[in-house]
Image (tube, rainbow, N blue to C red):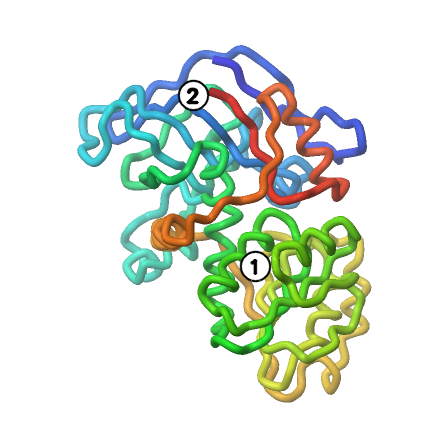
């Protein structure tokens, strides 16, 4: 099969080619697994973290990609839920132990043995992929493969972020950073909390205008002061400075949700600006988002079908994965980036 492979960690520059295009042997499903022909795979900011070493694969080479949509073309002896020809999705959560307190409570995302697609095992930047049937997701018929791919991470992690925020209808919410996940959160807020105004903070003027076009009542730079104090801010950036700015925009009792797998060290000095009375006093809260559970993905796919949610996407061929990653790294973003493979 054809695949784009990460062979060594590297910093991504404007014209970098961190992945290598190769022909490699086809994977074979074990007794519990499904073999899928990959149709599409979303391109996620987490791939930048993997390539640049902030959350690196334990072993190289590795096939990245964890927003995978494809058709079942083979399976082991045990799978029963899915049949050949079914369209399924594979998300960031690839496996968990199933027996620890977190797993038993439905919070597999916190399991110490959590395994991630495209980091701990090979992912979807390839023509074929395998997944244990218990960690595969039925794709609702409403979605095309290219529209479904970003839902499996950008959408699902956005759904978890919004759920953890505790937002009530009518409360104001801010979104810091406006890429694949945040633009889907905005759509969810408009559907689930129709009386809640959305304020968007983004460095790029193009992203600010995009947010206003999707229904935000205001948009400005990540350093801007919102015209109103906000009950919730969801931060999807890889930087520390927006965290400080977001805390300053919260109302008393407000909550900051940090939806990022890692924060970069390059601007860590901004934490020195943290002032207790300005940023934390009056019962403000900070909560991080760690991965997604199977329940998050399943519930979000149901919601997305009910909403008839269609992400804004930019499509690339498999061989153009490096271009998509470079554009993502250097803030050339409008919605979600998707590789069309099958």
Question: At 34% from the left edge and 41% from the top edge, which residue is drawn?
Answer: 140
Residue 28 at x, y = what percent?
A: 34, 19
Q: Toward which corner of the image does residue 231 lie, by quadrant? A: bottom right
Badge 2: few (under 14), some or many (20 or more) residues near its Cα, within 10 Å?
Answer: many
* SS at mark 1 in the image: helix
- Quadrant location of residue 276? bottom right
> Residue at left 61%, top 16%?
21
Relative height, residue 169 to residue 265 (above, below):
below
Q: Is residue 11 positioned above or below 234 on the image?
A: above
Q: Is residue 86 left or right of residue 245?
A: left
Label 1: how many residues lie within 10 Å, few (<14), some (14-19) or many (20+)?
Answer: many
Instruction: Name the residue that disc number 2 marks.
Output: 128
Q: Earlier in the sequence, mark 2 or mark 1?
A: 2
| Closest to the observer, 224 or 80 | 224
Q: How far apart, in angstroms, are the residues tagged by discs 2 and 1? A: 33 Å
| Label 2 secondary element | strand
Residue 139 visible in image: no
**Residue 86 figure quarter:** top left
| Nearer the observer, 24 or 146 | 146
Label 2 close to label 1 by CB (< 8 Å): no
State left or right for residue 49 relative to residue 153: right
Residue 338 is tagged as: none
Residue in front for this viewpoint, 154 or 310: 310
What's the mark number on residue 186? 1
245 over 215 or under it: above or below: below
Q: Is residue 19 visible?
A: yes
Q: Residue at x 35, y 60 (%)?
A: 102
Name the residue nearer the viewer: 114 or 145: 145
Against 126, residue 267 (above or below) is below
How far across and down, in percent of the image, does residue 259 sit?
Answer: 58, 58
x and y percentages locating residue 216 in the rendered image: 64, 63
């Amino acid at each position: 099969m054809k695949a784009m492979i990460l062979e060594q960690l590297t910093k991504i520059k404007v014209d970098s080619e961190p992945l290598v295009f190769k022909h490699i042997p086809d994977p074979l499903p074990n007794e519990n697994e499904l073999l899928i022909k990959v149709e599409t795979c979303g391109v996620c900011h987490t791939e930048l973290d993997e390539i640049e070493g902030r959350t690196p694969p334990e072993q190289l080479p590795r096939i990245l990609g964890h927003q995978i949509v494809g058709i079942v073309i083979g399976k082991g002896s045990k799978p029963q839920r899915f049949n050949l020809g079914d369209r399924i999705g594979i998300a960031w959560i690839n496996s968990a132990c199933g027996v620890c307190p977190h797993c038993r409570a439905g919070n597999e995302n916190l399991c110490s043995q959590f395994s991630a697609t495209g980091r701990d095992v090979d992912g979807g930047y390839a023509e074929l992929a395998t997944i244990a049937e218990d960690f595969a997701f039925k794709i609702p018929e409403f979605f095309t493969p290219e529209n479904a791919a970003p839902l499996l991470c950008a959408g699902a992690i956005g759904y978890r972020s919004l759920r953890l925020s505790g937002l009530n209808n009518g409360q104001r919410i801010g979104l810091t950073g406006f890429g694949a996940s945040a633009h889907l959160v905005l759509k969810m807020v408009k559907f689930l909390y129709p009386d809640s105004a959305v304020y968007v903070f983004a460095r790029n003027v193009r992203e600010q205008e995009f947010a206003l076009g999707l229904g935000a009542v205001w948009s400005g730079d990540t350093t801007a002061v919102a015209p109103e104090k906000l009950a919730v801010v969801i931060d999807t950036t890889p930087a520390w400075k927006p965290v400080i700015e977001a805390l300053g925009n919260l109302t008393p009792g407000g909550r900051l949700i940090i939806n990022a797998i890692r924060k970069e060290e390059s601007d860590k000095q901004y934490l020195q600006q943290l002032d207790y009375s300005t940023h934390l006093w009056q019962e403000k809260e900070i909560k991080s988002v760690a991965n997604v559970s199977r329940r998050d993905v399943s519930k979000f796919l149901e919601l997305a079908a009910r909403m008839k949610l269609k992400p804004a996407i930019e499509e690339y061929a498999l061989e153009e994965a490096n271009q998509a990653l470079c554009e993502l790294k250097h803030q050339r973003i409008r919605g979600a980036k998707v590789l069309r493979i099958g």
